Image (tube, rainbow, N blue to C red):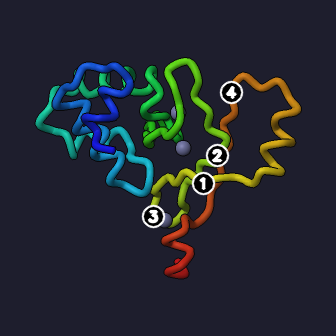
Amino acid sequence: MTSEKTLKQFNLRITKIRIAVLDALSASPAALSYSVLQDALSAFDRTTLYRTLLTLTDHGLIHKAYEENGESYYARCFGCTGQDHHHEHLHLKCSSCGGVECLEISEELKLNLAQLPFEEINISAKGPCSSCAIQGG
Ligand SMILES: [Zn+2]
Ligand SMILES: [Zn+2]
Ligand SMILES: [Zn+2]
């Protein structure tokens, strides 16, 4: 689905920056940090970029995948709505390339977690990401 169609589906106004943010996050296999997004989208006003990230997060199109040293990493959501972000997945911060990956977790672990009345689940881990692990570094 194109970013434009995604915005329509979520009843959001289509703006250049929203499309640009969604395109950037959809094209990247890893979550992107705020500063990387800012560099990639330097044509846009910084305040507008910040507000766009908040809006897209609020409506369930993107999520904050990781936070470290005041730097937030964002990734695309699939199957989330504004009321209900469900990220029963793990965020892996790569110790080698510094990227952040969204990884699915096993059904068993999901079932275990579901027995507790969590309001929010945020699982993060550190170690080589899938591409760095393959390269052996
Ligand atoms: Zn989400
Ligand atoms: Zn890596
Ligand atoms: Zn994620």
Mark 1 near mark 2, Cβ–Cβ under 8 Å? yes
Residue positioned 31% across, 20% down in the render: 12
**Mark number for residue 89?**
2
Helix, strand or loop at mark 4? loop
Query: Which residue, as the protein is rendered here, is positioned at the far bottom?
Result: 136
Amino acid at pointer 1: Leu
Amino acid at pointer 4: Glu
Disc 3 from disc 2: Cα separation: 20 Å
Residue positioned 16% across, 38% down in the render: 42
Amino acid at pointer 2: His
Disc 3 from disc 4: Cα separation: 28 Å
Q: Looking at the image, is mark 1 or mark 2 earlier in the sequence? A: 2
Q: Looking at the image, is mark 1 or mark 4 earlier in the sequence? A: 1
Dividing the image into 4 quarters, which one contains the N terminus?
top left
Classify 10 Å Cα crowding around label 2: few (below 14), some (14-19), many (20 and above).
some
Rendering quarter of residue 10: top left
Residue 77's x, y, as percent?
A: 48, 38
Amino acid at pointer 3: Cys
- The reply, left or right, for residue 21 in relation to residue 79 is left
Residue positioned 57% across, 67% down in the render: 128
Q: Which residue is mark 4?
A: 120
Rendering quarter of residue 28: bottom left
Q: Looking at the image, is mark 2 or mark 4 earlier in the sequence? A: 2
